[in-house]
C-alpha cells in the first residue's frame, strides 16, 4: 500500500464510526513511535537490525512502556541494548508523555519515510 492510498476516499470509507478511525490513528501512532525507536537503536548501535557488527553492545529485546498522547494512552515496545546505554530521544527514559509526537508521526508517514529516513531525522534532533 502506498502512502497516497491512506488518504483516498475508498480507504477512508471503511471507517464507519469515529471510534474506528480513532483506533486506526492510535495504532498508526503506536507503530510510528516504535519504528522511530528502532531507527534510534540502529543509529545508536551503528547497524541495522538485520546486520552484524563488531560492536559488543547488541540488541537485547524490548520492554513495554505506557505513553500518553493527546489521543489517549497506549503501550509501546521500546528496544533495549545489552549495555543499557540506549537513551531514546522520541520517548526518553522515565517519561510517559509524548508531546506532539502524533504530528511528527503522521507527517513522517505522509511523506513516505523509510527506516533510514527516520534515523536521519532522529540524528538531526
Image (tube, rainbow, N blue to C red):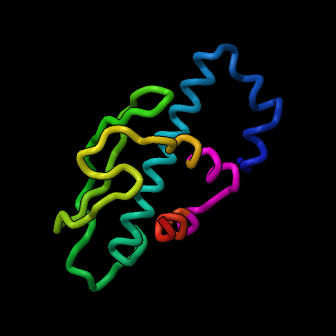
Place of residue 24 in the rendered image (x, y in percent of width and height, measured from the top left): 58, 29
User: In the figure, 114 relative to 3: above or below?
Assistant: below
Q: Which of 76 and 60 is in front in this view?
A: 76
User: In the figure, 28 relative to 41: above or below?
Assistant: above
Place of residue 58 in the rendered image (x, y in percent of width and height, measured from the top left): 25, 71
Image point (69%, 49%), residue name: 110
Image point (44%, 26%), residue name: 72
Place of residue 14 in the rendered image (x, y in percent of width and height, measured from the top left): 72, 23
Residue stretch rendered in magenta on the structure? 105-117
Q: Is residue 25 left or right of residue 84?
A: right
Image point (81%, 30%), residue name: 10
Place of residue 93 in the rendered image (x, y in percent of width and height, measured from the top left): 26, 51
Q: Which of 17 and 100 is in front in this view?
A: 100
User: In the figure, 55 relative to 62: above or below?
Assistant: below
Residue sitting at the far left: 83
Residue sitting at the far top: 17
Choose top left, top right, bottom left or bottom right for residue 82: bottom left
Residue 50 visible in this rendered orientation of the protein: no
Residue 113 lies in magenta, yes or no?
yes
Identify the main secondary structure in magenta: helix
Amino acid at each position: 500500500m502506498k502512502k497516497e492510498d491512506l488518504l483516498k476516499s475508498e480507504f477512508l470509507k471503511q471507517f464507519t464510526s469515529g471510534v474506528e478511525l480513532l483506533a486506526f490513528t492510535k495504532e498508526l501512532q503506536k507503530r510510528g513511535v516504535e519504528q522511530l525507536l528502532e531507527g534510534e537503536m540502529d543509529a545508536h548501535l551503528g547497524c541495522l537490525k538485520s546486520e552484524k557488527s563488531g560492536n559488543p553492545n547488541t540488541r537485547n529485546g524490548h520492554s513495554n512502556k505506557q505513553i500518553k498522547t493527546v489521543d489517549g494512552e497506549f503501550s509501546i515496545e521500546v528496544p533495549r541494548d545489552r549495555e543499557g546505554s540506549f537513551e531514546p530521544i522520541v520517548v526518553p527514559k522515565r517519561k510517559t508523555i509524548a508531546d506532539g509526537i502524533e504530528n511528527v508521526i503522521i507527517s513522517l508517514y505522509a511523506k513516505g519515510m523509510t527506516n533510514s529516513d527516520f534515523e536521519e531525522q532522529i540524528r538531526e534532533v
